[in-house]
Each structure stands twice: as C-alpha cells, then as structure tokens.
Amino acid sequence: MTGTEWHASDTLLERFAVDPAVVDDARAASLEAHLIDCATCRISLGRLVEPTVVDDSWAQVRDQIDEPRLTVVERGMVALGVPQDWARILAATPGFRLAGIAAVVAALVGVVVSSRSTDTTGLFLVVAPLFPLAVATAAFLPMADPGGEAGVATPMHGAGLALRRGAALSATMFVLLGLTDLSIGGAGAPLAAWVLPSLALAAGATALGTWYSAPVVLASMGSIWIVVVTSVRWIDGRGTAFADSTTFAGPGRWCAACVLLVALVVIGIRRDRFDTMEVFS
Amino acid sequence: MTATVAMAGLQKRFGSLVALDSVDLDFAPGVNGLLGPNGAGKTTLLRITATAMAPDRGRVEVLGRDISTGAGRLATRRTLGYLPQEPGFHRQFSAFDFVDYVAILKEWGNRRRRHDEVRRVLALVGLESQMHKRISQLSGGMRRRVAIAQALIGGPRLLVLDEPTAGLDPEQRLRFRELLGNVAEGSTVLLSTHQTDDVAALCQRVVVLLGGRVAFSGTPAELASLAAGRVWTAKERTADAELAWVTSEGTIRQIGHPPSGADLVAPTVEDGYLLLAGSPVATAGAA
C-alpha cells in the first residue's frame, strides 16, 4: 500500500537521481513529497541511482557525523586562515589549552592591577620575559603532546613541528603582553626593552632543553633572569627605575640579542634532539 | 630471511644505570617477542627501534635505513606503528579524535581517506560503537584498545608494541592474538610482554633480556627446551628446587635439579624463562 495513485516516470526519476538540481524547484519539491509516501517510487529511484553515488552520499553523511568538533582555539586559528589539520596540531600544544591561556591572562591581569596600584610600571618589564620562557618550555615538551609517546614516533614530529608550535604560542603570548603593555600605558621603555629579553629567554630555554629537563631549564633560566635584573639594578644604583636600568637599555638589549643569536645557532645544531622524546627530559 | 630490524652494539645509559649493554639483534618478518623482568631494557629497546629515543652508541637499521639520520628516521616513521607502554591520552579527546589526531601526525592529509582509516582501525579493535565516547569515559581495557588502534593506522610494515595485552581481559587478549595474527602477515612485529603464554601462542621468535643484555634468542620451543629434564612435580617441595609452586591439581611443580626418580614433566616457555631469569649460571651460558 503506497497511499498514492500515481507514480513518477522513470525519466523524471532518472533525472532526479543523477542531479536533483536539473529538475525545476516546484517539480522537485512535489517529487520529494511524493517519495516520502510512495514506496514503489522509492524502490524505482533506488534502482536508478548509481551505487557509487549512494556510497559517496553516505560517506559524506558519515564524515559530517564523525568530524571532530573544533575547539575555540582551533576555530580562532581556522578563522585566521590556518588549515584545519594544522589548527588541530597547533591547538593541541599544551600551552594552548584553555586552562593554560586562562592562567596566563589571570597573571597578566595581576601585573596590570599591581602596576597601577603601586605605580611600579617597571614590574611589567621584569615579569614579561618570564611568560614566553614558561610558554617555550610547555610548547616543546613532547610528552605533553596529546599523542604522547605515540605522537613522537610519527613523521610529522620533530624540530619543524616544535618550532611551529613555539612560534604560534609565542605570537599569542606577545599579543597578550603587548595588550598588557598598552593597558598600563607603556612600561616606560620601548617595546624592544621587553621583547628582546623575552625572545632571548624563550630561545635560550629551548636551546638548553636539548640538554636538560623542563623543570631544570625553567628554574635556572628564571633564576638567572631575576638575579641579572636585580644585580644590574643594584649596580646602577638603588633609586634607578627599571625602565632606566642597564638591563633594559642599550647594552642590555645588545646582550639579549647576542643570547638570542647564540640560542638560535644551538637550536639549529641540535635540532635532531627535537626528533625524540628526550628533549626537555 | 632478510632482517627488517638490525641492531649492532646498542648501548643506552640513564645516569649510572645501564639500560642496554652491547645489544646485537636482528628481527625478521613475523612476530618477535621480548621477555624480561622489569628494568631489563625491553622498553628502552622498543623506544629506540620506534625512533622515540636515540641510543648512546650502536647502530639500528630498519628496512636497511640507518635511523640515526634524519632521512632514515623519517622513512622508518612512515612504515611504523608504535604502541608505547603509557600512551598518554588527551582525555578530552574521543577515541575517534585521538586516533584521527595521530593519523594527522602520520601525514594522512586527505580527510575522507583518513576518517575511513580511523574507522577501520577502531573497528579492528572492536570499538566501532564506542568511537565517539570521550577517552576519560572508557575503561582501562578500552583505552588500551584505542592505543592499539592508533598503532595500526596505515597497515605498518613494522609494528612495535610495548606490553600490548596489559589491562586486557582474557577474551580481549584472545581477540588481540587473532588480530595480531592477521595484521602481522608480511609485517614485522616486536612486542614486549610479561605473559609467557602470549609468547608461546603468538611469537615465531623470542628474545630474553636480562640486565640490558641478550640472555636468550631463539624460538619459543627452544626457550622451553632450556628447562627440559629440570621440571618435575611432587607432593612436597624438594630442597634442590630453585622455584616451586602449588598447581591447581594440588601437586608442587618444581624447577631446578630434580632428584633421582622425580616425576619429570614437559617444560613450558614459562619454565624456560623462569629458569633463565632466576639462574645466573643459565643466564651467563645462554645467548
């Protein structure tokens, strides 16, 4: 029992089966409504449709269902033009997880609040380079990758992937730091005053990570930075503002640029270490 | 038969601990089992073979390519499936997401083909109906199967499996044996295990590592034969027994130097392994 007294012609069904767009809208809508009720025409249509078309159609439906849902970070990257597969790989970087980003934003808000309330804008100059340092350590930890050790033994794993992740994470970090700098009305020094030390610490940590574990690198580089900043300021004279301290002025910037250069050379020479799970471990 | 994996003079230390000491081994197509107590160097050997770790000294070739070079490592990774002991899942991923993520890292760029492959390997391990569940919601055995699935992506020519049956229930272990029997055809499988019955059932060849050295290399039957004439049962423990335990029949199965007139029984792979691992004399003599 089909519930209908008429049946669509084979010609119409064939045209509809091959490409529904070639049937005019009114007729196509009528045929679609009829097919819902008429089992005979559905069977006829099924015979006319190429099996490959059906398979292809089902594959598309299945793919839509199985397609992994994009996270907020992935969506942001895709909107910026990053291919979807790369967005997934980059967003899987531990530092890009929402908890990590939230922690960084909270810390930067803390910097803004304390800078305004205590009128010590130089605080930003001291702490800003520590953020890329922490981020670099998180970006390159192979064991923190969602693929874990299994991800290490894949063709895409290596220095190229690690550096892409580092670059993506650093770019995000520098945008956040730049916004912080703006929100406190500038740290009383040009951008280079904190950008160069930040790059030097991040690259230095990455280079050291080819020898030492992440906690050792993080603790030693962070300590060295704090000791250098406070010692140089003590030599400069206690009353010297951070912005005027040698660390953030010309000589300090040259020093940071040299550290950055040496670190990049070391990373280039020891890039094979990024191929295994032993980097930062 | 040509070796798929050839190792020569392999050494690896972690501080003062020698994990591997002058290991020379070849592995041919088929299933090759690694036995040894904890800390014997099995995981280190598998990690080096899977290019996840570099040796301090020595040379490893996979399908004729030196994996200490960038090109050799890349070529090896393109033919490799690796199941680590602790896969380290991103728990917010579903089983499908995780395997899909590893497939992306394995250069499966075409999304349609990649998704088909992900569905195929998840079906192989019997997870087709659970593939969209978050990994954090899966049982330990199911997580192990997800990890096995990612290792099977692309039908690798070399499959490196570190304790693949750990956490699987008896039925899943039997299914895994069946699966491995199918996928291992034409490939080389290296698997480490503590399950001697898995070795007896699956492996054409078995290597026993003790203290980072190769203590035995041969067929499971040859490993079992190490204990020939040295396994017996009795109602009471004999003084000369190196190892003894009560069986389900209530008798005491013993390994060591049997007394005259002892009721000798046919040795198993486990007997051979226990004799080897528990006896410094046997360890030094075998290789």
Image: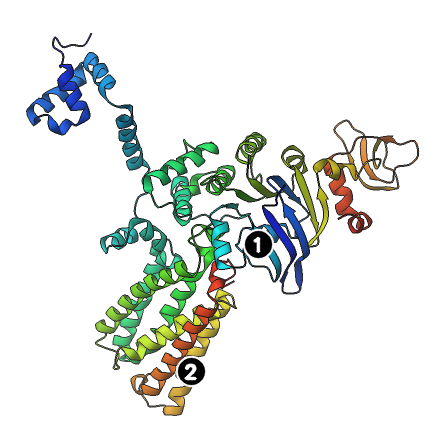
The residue to which callout 2 is attached is A228
In front: A135, or A60? A60
- Give the SS element for disc 2: helix
Quarter assignment of residue B201: top right
* Secondary structure under the numbered disc 1 in the rendered image: helix
Chain under numbered label 1: B
Give the colouring mode of the picture.
rainbow
Callout 1 amino acid: Ile
In the image, B43: left or right of A231?
right
| Residue A13 vertical position relative to residue B231 in the rendered view, above or below | above
Residue B25 to residue A172: above or below: above
Q: Which is nearer the eye, A73 or A82?
A: A82
Q: As drawn, is A218 to the left or to the right of B35?
A: left
Image side of residue A207 versus residue A111, left or right: right
Q: Which mark is residue A2?
A: none
Residue B99 location (% of width, % of height): 42, 42
Residue A2, placed above or below residue B184: above
- Near mark 2 (Cα within 10 A), the count class, few <14, some 14-19 or many ≥20, is few
Find disc 1 in the rendering and name its residue.
B48
Say whether marks 2 and 1 touch (CB < 8 Å): no
